[in-house]
Image (spheres, coloured by chain):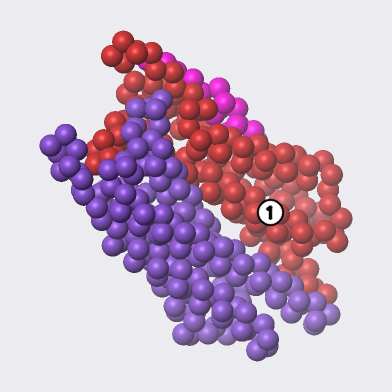
Chain colours: A purple, B red
Amino acid sequence: MSLSTRIPMFLLRLLALGATVSAVVIMVTSHDSAQVFNMKFDAKYTNSPTFKYFVLMNAIAGGYTLILLFFPSKNSCGHMILVLDLIMALLLDSSISACVAIGQVGKSGNSHAGWLPICGQVPKFCDHVTGALAAGFVAAIAYFLVVLYSLHNVMNLFALKT
Amino acid sequence: MSLSTRIPMFLLRLLALGATVSAVVIMVTSHDSAQVFNMKFDAKYTNSPTFKYFVLMNAIAGGYTLILLFFPSKNSCGHMILVLDLIMALLLDSSISACVAIGQVGKSGNSHAGWLPICGQVPKFCDHVTGALAAGFVAAIAYFLVVLYSLHNVMNLFALKT
């Protein structure tokens, strides 16, 4: 891969690394508590399996990105890395979608199921989760672009050879 | 593309079509009602924006698959179709993840947020949603395989030319 194709890829991965690390940090540090009907209600990310899944997936994607940034691959691994990039894009997409679904219930509730919104009670927690979702969204977009750019490069590479 | 590479792709797309249509039909026909504290509780998919999103995404993926099955593309559109396949895989992945997150709350509730499980009251609704999720999962896997297989073919195609 030439330098001119490496630089945009490096920048995209750097963006993905920053976004995944931010998403993990913002989600893990989210905490708020409220007094509801004499019951102390402690909101933290470990309360929901979905938020734990979000943290895990962003941590995996961040670790993977870090490894690729510091140990640039040989060209021969290109196909395997493209498949791994695709899997990362899918995992990040999945984690963000699941969190948005839960966040929507947290914000608006669901009157049909009798689930009350909780963001009124724990606004600081909700703000943190929203921030983490925004960072996760940037990471997911960055990995989508990484996959598109890899595809473009792989096709160009082969086209040049012909 | 030769016939031997077309057949697996055709079968994968046929599987995806069957799965997305099943997911839409099972989700749309899900309905159950229960009497809770003298209040009639009607469970249907339109109660949740997440389930509506699931139906929409599966319908889009189903329609797209149908078009590709009946109007096979020219080779020159291969790259665009690969990108569209990738987008379908991401959309299906996103819809299934969001639904699993909501379904998990529906099944187990979330004691921290005070959200009670509802599957005990409306078991028929929950069974339908579970079935729709299973079909959606098959569709998402099928599209993941479509993308992997397309990648494999594109690379082989270029490799043969060199």
Q: Is residue B25 magenta?
A: yes
Q: Is B59 left, or right, of B116 in this rendering?
A: right
Q: Nearer the viewer, residue A121 or B64?
A: A121
Q: Is B159 left, or right, of B22 in this rendering?
A: right
Farthest residue to the bottom: give it. Answer: A3
Residue A158 lies in quadrant: bottom right
Which quadrant holds the N terminus of chain A? Answer: bottom right
Farthest residue to the top: give it. Answer: B38
Crowdedness near tag 1: few (<14), some (14–19) or many (≥20) residues, C-alpha within 10 Å: many
Query: Which amino acid type is shown beneath numbered disc 1?
Result: Asp
Residue B116 location in percent, x, y?
A: 29, 31
Q: Residue at x 53, y 85 (%)?
A: A72
Q: Is residue B70 magenta?
A: no
Q: Classify mark 1: helix, strand or loop.
A: helix
Q: Residue at x 66, y 43 (%)?
A: B61
Q: Nearer the viewer, residue A81 or B35?
A: B35
Is the residue B19 above or below the residue B43 in the image? below
Residue B72 location in percent, x, y?
A: 83, 48
Is the residue B96 above or below the residue A144 in the image? above
Q: Residue at x 61, y 52 (%)?
A: B89
Residue B159 lies in quadrant: bottom right
Chain of the residue that carries numbered disc 1 in the rendered image: B
Is the residue B86 above or below the residue A107 in the image? below
On the question of residue A99 being in view, the answer is yes
Residue range in magenta is B20-34
Residue B122 location in percent, x, y?
A: 38, 21
Tell me the residue that label 1 is attached to: B85
On the question of residue B105 being in view, the answer is no
